[in-house]
Structures are given as structure tokens and as C-alpha cells.
Amino acid sequence: ITKKYRYNFGGFKVKTNEEVTKKNIINKRKIIISILLFAIIVYSIIVVYKLIGNPVDNFFVENGEITFEESTEGYIIRDETIVEGNNYKNGIAQIKSEGDKVAKGESIFRYYSNNEEDLTKKIKDLDVKIQDAMSKDNTLFSSDIKLLESQIEQKLVDIYEQNDIQKIKEYKKDINTYITKKAKIAGEKSPSGSYIKKLIDERTSYENKLNEGAEYVTAPKSGVVSYRVDGLEDVLSVDGFSKLNKKFLDDLKLKTSQVIATSEEKGKVINNFKCYLACYIKSDKAKEAKIGDKVKIRLPNSKETTATVEYISVEEDNGVLLVFGLENYVEELISYRKIAFDIIWWSDKGLKVPNSAILKDENNISYVVRNRAGYYEKIYVNVLRNNNNYSIVKNYTTKELQELGIDNNQISNRKSISLYDQLVLEPTNEIIKNIR
């Protein structure tokens, strides 16, 4: 029998040596593949069993920020001066709008005169005619007018969605102010002798009659104008911190985030460069606070600003009365006397890990367990800052480990924590025993 041919002997086929060799190779390959598949199946079963029987939660190290903060309620204290005249019973016509800046000696508002009602009705009728005429004149659409129109539209939407009568009144006043400003701009841009110009001139004439003999009230100092007078301007004053305590503030019976109503009799000028937040807290951080400490305050609108501890008073029940000074967003707080806010005592950035991943060894040194493809490694970490949930950590230096009493052999073989490392959360005793 040769390698290339096969013959029949008595009707039986005889395989060549080459065919026998190929078949043996194929059989061996099948056996090897079967063994590998069996090993993979067994390994998968073991892994699944471990995951089900003893699941391990992991966390990937990330660059992050942690803060230590608490929520509280505070009372707004401002440097504010009431302004009023003799004819307060007549009601006021605003010259400066809510939130406008004013210089010392400028007119803020005036009191209505005796024939005010008739003249006011004529002005309102003219406003309707002016508005109608302006809507038909496309040549007047300057950027200022477009802005005022968008503000009017927004206030109309706000009125439609609002149920609070006081706020509806506020929005209507704002709309009247925008319409007046719009008419004045239109008057400046309208050609002499035009229909709109005549209407606006007639309106101006009525306004002048209103102003004749009227009592004007001027600003005693520079600042921001407000008509939200609540009678607490002298009660919560910038020079009266010493009288503040929990009972004093509670007795004011103020509702959090309630908008101060607009007065029809008087106004006030507010120092817009600084205001204060007084609050009562019983936390450990509040008890550790010192005059001059810097913190961050998160306001109800989610804006954050730096604040300084200006006054501290420890009360009998071990609570602390704190007064914070703010120099930003003062004008945004004019409408309120009491607000909810957050005190951010500190913040820190770096490698961020959950507290549940940090353990202590027999020498009270912090470490984490890193998981690399099922192999667990012990890594010493220096905890810089921590709050209730997370910590900011870094690697120890060689000198720091030596000072902690770690032997040189461990130091030379130490592992380092880095970004995206997979850490084990709440490692079990079994995992800790298998640490390398």
C-alpha cells in the first residue's frame, strides 16, 4: 500500500497512512476544544455562583468635589431707610420703579393730587389709543420697544398662571410701567405732527397737570428704591444684632419665601451693596464658627455667593445665632424678609471615593481595596476631607508612611490609587483575607 493509493482486498477498503494521520489530528483537536469548552463552562458557573452567592459592589475612582452643607431658614436684614411725605393718604405715583437705583436728592415718587382720578382715567384711555396706534405702525419697532413688549407679554402670562391677588396687582403695576416707558420711546421716535405724536403729547399734558402742586418725595441717600415696606425696617436693623435670638425671630411670625406686599403710602431706599442673613442653628459646624469665617450661601434661586460670619451668639439651649454678611445678589432679595437657604461650610476637590470603600487597619491607617480582574489589592490612602457620604483622598508619600510606622518592605511594594481604579465597597472578611 502506498501513500497515494488504496486497494480493495476481499472487498475491504484500506486507508492510506496520510488519511489515518489526518483523522488522528482532527480527533485530537476535537478533544482539546471539548476540554477548553468544558473549562470555560466550569469557570463561568463558578463566577456566576460567586456573583450570586457573594456579590461585590464596586466604585470607579473619579475626580470630583464634595461639600459639607446644611439647610436652614434665615431672616434678611438690610440697611434701609423709609421715605414718606405728608399726603400719604392720597396714594403714590411711582417715579422710580421697584429696584431702580437712585441718587441722593432724586425724586422717588409723588402723592396723588385731588383731581387725580379724572386725569388718571384720561391717561389710561390715551394709553389704549397709543397702544393701538403703535401696533399698526411698523416703523417704531426699535430694540427697546421690542424688549418692553416681550416683558409685557411675559407679565400677562404670569397673571394668567397666578392665583395670588397681591402678585396679580404687582404684575399689573409692572405692565403699566412698561406701557408708559414704551409710549415715551414711541413719542421720541414719532415724526412731528403724526397721530401717535399728538396722542403722546396729550398724555404728557395730562401728566404735567398731575404733577402740578403734587408733593414729591426725594431720596435721603443713594441706593435702590423699593415699595415693599413691611414695618420691620427698624426692627431688623443692621445695628441691632445684639437683640437677636431665637425667640425674638420666632415672635416675628414670618412665613418663609413670602413676598412683601407693596405699600401705597411710602417707599424706602436700600443699601444695595450689602445685606445680612440671621439664622439659628444647632449643628456642630455652627458651634465651631468664628467671626470672619468665609462660607458659601446657596440662595433659593440656586445661585451661590460667598458670605462672611459677622456676628455669633450662643444661646442657653446650646444653639447658635449666626449673622452672615452678603455682598452679592442683594437686589434679588428685596422682595423677601425670610428665606430658606443652604450653608456650604466647605468644599474640596480631588480623587473622590465613597466612605463605604475606606477601611482601617490594625494601626488605624486608612486603606481601600482595589479590584483588578478578581485580584484584590490593599492601597493606603490619606483622607483629606470627608462628608457623610464621600471622601477626598490622595496617596501617602514615602515619608508619611514611614512616620505612620509602615515597614520599608511594605512601602517599597505599596500600590497607588489613581483615576478610574475599581474599588470594593464594604469589602467582606473573605475579600480582606485575599488581599495581596
Image (spheres, helix red, strand yellow):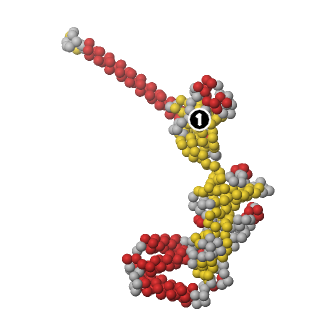
- Reading the image, the residue beneath label 1 is 395
The amino acid marked with disc number 1 is Asn
The residue at 69%/54% (across/down) is: 292
Q: Closest to the observer: 97 or 8?
A: 97
Q: Closest to the observer: 26 or 294?
A: 294
* Quadrant of residue 264 within the rendered picture: bottom right
Q: Where is residue 336 in the image (x, y as percent from the top left)?
A: 63, 67
Q: Position of residue 369 (x, y in %)?
A: 58, 33
Q: Closest to the observer: 17 or 61?
A: 61
Residue 323 shows in this picture: yes
Is 341 on the left-hand or right-hand side of 22? right
The residue at 58%/78% (across/down) is: 94
* Quadrant of residue 17 within the rendered picture: top left
Q: Where is residue 322 in the image (x, y as percent from the top left)?
A: 71, 57
User: Mark 1 Cα within 10 Å, few/some/many (few <14, many 20+)?
Assistant: some
Q: Where is residue 283 in the image (x, y as percent from the top left)?
A: 71, 52
Extreme-top residue of the structure: 1
